[in-house]
């Protein structure tokens, strides 16, 4: 984008005249002229000198303002950025826009803070930590510590969770609004009603650009009887104030496994029914199989390759019938959690009016700049569906906002973004998986390290874990790191810059770690490409 400072404009008619003149220059894709701000923005491959001549021919003077602008000049009489959705992506977009100098409006028709704070990351990890603390008391790692009898007051857990979420909502969202006077927030239903126009509650507003960050909701599959059943979803399970006697979970992905293990450790009987032949989604097969084994050893009942055919309420109890290995089976429980994925919140917000395209699942289609099929509308977060993680939502929100206001200046490297399943042990991953490498025809080699070879894991009795690493055959560039271990979601952070900046096996081996640490496992795994780890002394290179 080229930005020109225009001299001599005195009215909107002047701006129209200059716009027409600029649009007549070869290579101009789009031209916008802003009065009374006094500048023009030109997109395309036009020659700067030709643009200057066009402005001069129209009777005005122009000079280069900034070829790649780093700040945005507010339009003043309208919202520079309209953000539909008040979660992580929406607030990240608003903060970035405010930093650039824009006037912003966020509209949210649900609770401020979105899924992560209210119905996802925060409440689930709180329950996981409570359950882990209880589990460690019941089953200490060392024989020198005697087992302790203990109970849990789940109603008190529920109360503590509510206080936690309320406090974080105030600190991370309401207080943020106080710190950014250029961001306006409205609790209302919002929808697009025309070009650069939206309805917010009962009023109409105009905007320059918009970012859709409406998030997602739990997907409820079509199963006979489910419409009459008492079900929980990942949005509602955290509202209960009692401990389920027998929780049946449909879905063996991250949500089902995390919540399932938490309730199992707090005292519930837990059964998981998964339609595919494995749990853990697309994670590395040997890691997810190890996780399945560990969860079953804890007492979790897991059925894979199981198709649910009927759900029936009998009084307050639930009967679930499913087919497995050609047989019909039944499970009887007191509560049911449906954890079969999420769907985008893109219905009834006026996208069709603006010709914003969505795919067959309803996710908004965007280009590499998060721009939709309507050049004035961008989208970020779960409603885009590229990677449904709160960290990705926040990054996408900021990038979409900057691209909307300054022109398409940034792209996202999704390959170096990590993710984790917060079971115990945690399954964390960054970079390519083996199946992806095979599909892309990339020549690679792999190394596997058991945590029973990691000194810190040995002394801390955290030996039940595995790390798997892939490297390019000819260059030794590390392409993927996958961990199943206690604190795996922390350890994986050492691998992020390795993937992002294309480090090699030799680069990692030359790094010096603090000893003893669990993150040293990354270096040990890299070393295992070239030598037998079991024959190394401590800290040997």
Image (cartoon, rainbow, N blue to C red):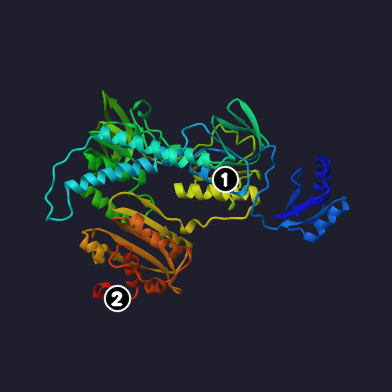
Image quadrant in which the N terminus is located: bottom right
Q: Position of residue 279 (x, y in %)?
A: 33, 48
Evaluate whether residue 274 shows in this view: no
Give the residue furthest to the top.
Answer: 315
Q: In the rendered view, does 402 fall on the left or right side of 117?
A: right
- Nearest to viewer (mark 1 / mark 2): 2
Q: Nearer the viewer, residue 504 or 239?
A: 239
Mark linked to residue 540: 2
Evaluate whether residue 171 shows in this view: yes
Cα separation, mark 1 vs mark 2, equals 50 Å
Q: In the rendered view, does 51 fall on the left or right side of 383?
A: right
Q: Position of residue 257 (x, y in %)?
A: 31, 45
Q: Nearer the viewer, residue 164 or 383?
A: 164
**Residues at discs 1 and 2 in contact (Cβ within 8 Å):** no
Q: Of callouts 1 and 2, which one flags the residue occurring earlier in the amino acid sequence?
A: 1
Q: Residues within 10 Å of mark 1 (few under 14, many from 20)?
A: some
Mark linked to residue 396: none
Helix, strand or loop status at disc 1: loop
Image quadrant in which the C terminus is located: bottom left
In this rendering, the answer to whether 427 lies above or below 226 is: below
Q: Residues within 10 Å of mark 2 (few under 14, many from 20)?
A: few
**Residue 130, quarter of the rendered image:** top left
Query: Mark 1 — residue?
Result: 365
Helix, strand or loop status at disc 2: loop
**Residue 125, quarter of the rendered image:** top left
In this rendering, the answer to whether 187 lies above or below 176 is: above
Q: Nearer the viewer, residue 393 or 298?
A: 393
Residue found 43% across the figure and 38% down from its top: 169
Q: Position of residue 330 (x, y in %)?
A: 25, 35
């Amino acid at each position: 984008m080229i930005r020109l400072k225009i001299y001599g404009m005195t009215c909107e008619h002047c701006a129209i005249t200059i716009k027409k003149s600029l649009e007549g220059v070869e290579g101009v894709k789009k031209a916008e002229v802003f009065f009374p701000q006094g500048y023009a923005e030109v997109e395309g491959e036009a020659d700067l000198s030709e643009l200057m001549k066009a402005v001069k021919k129209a009777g005005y003077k122009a000079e280069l303002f900034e070829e790649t602008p780093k700040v945005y000049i507010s339009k003043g009489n309208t919202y520079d950025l309209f953000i539909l959705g008040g979660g992580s992506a929406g607030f990240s977009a608003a903060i970035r826009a405010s930093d650039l100098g824009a006037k912003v409006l966020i509209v949210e028709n649900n609770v401020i803070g979105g899924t992560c704070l209210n119905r996802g990351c925060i409440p689930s990890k709180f329950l996981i930590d409570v359950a882990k603390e209880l589990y460690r008391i019941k089953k200490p790692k060392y024989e020198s510590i005697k087992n302790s009898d203990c109970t849990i007051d789940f109603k008190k857990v529920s109360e503590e969770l509510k206080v936690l979420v309320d406090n974080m909502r105030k600190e991370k969202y309401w207080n943020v609004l106080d710190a950014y006077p250029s961001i306006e927030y409205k609790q209302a239903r919002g929808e697009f009603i025309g070009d650069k126009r939206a309805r917010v509650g009962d009023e109409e507003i105009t905007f320059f650009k918009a970012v859709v960050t409406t998030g997602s909701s739990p997907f409820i599959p079509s199963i006979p009887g489910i419409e009459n059943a008492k079900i929980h979803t990942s949005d509602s399970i955290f509202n209960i104030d009692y401990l389920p006697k027998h929780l049946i979970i449909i879905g063996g992905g991250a949500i089902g496994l995390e919540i399932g293990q938490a309730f199992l450790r707090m005292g519930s009987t837990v059964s998981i029914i998964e339609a595919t032949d494995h749990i853990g989604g697309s994670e590395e097969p040997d890691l997810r199989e190890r996780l399945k084994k560990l969860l079953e050893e804890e007492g979790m009942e897991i059925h894979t390759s199981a198709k649910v055919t009927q759900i029936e309420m009998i009084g307050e109890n639930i009967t679930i019938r499913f087919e497995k290995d050609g047989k019909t089976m039944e499970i009887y429980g007191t509560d049911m959690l449906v954890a079969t994925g999420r769907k985008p919140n893109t219905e009834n917000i006026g996208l069709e009016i603006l010709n914003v395209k969505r795919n067959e699942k309803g996710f908004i289609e965007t280009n590499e700049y998060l721009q939709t099929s309507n050049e004035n509308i961008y989208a970020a977060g779960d409603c885009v569906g590229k990677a449904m993680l709160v960290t990705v939502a926040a990054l996408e929100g900021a990038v979409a906002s900057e691209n909307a206001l300054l022109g398409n200046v940034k792209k996202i490297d999704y390959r170096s973004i990590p993710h984790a399943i917060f079971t115990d042990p945690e399954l964390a991953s960054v970079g390519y998986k083996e199946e992806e490498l095979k599909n892309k025809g990339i020549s690679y080699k792999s190394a596997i390290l058991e945590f029973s070879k990691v000194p810190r894991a040995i002394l801390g009795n955290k030996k039940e874990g595995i790390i798997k690493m892939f490297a390019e055959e000819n260059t030794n560039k590390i392409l993927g790191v996958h961990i199943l271990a206690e604190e795996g979601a922390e350890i994986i952070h050492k691998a992020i810059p390795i993937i992002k900046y294309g480090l090699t096996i030799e680069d990692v081996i030359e790094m010096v770690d603090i000893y003893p640490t669990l993150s040293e496992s990354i270096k040990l795994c890299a070393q295992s490409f070239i030598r037998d780890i079991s024959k190394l002394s401590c800290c040997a290179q």
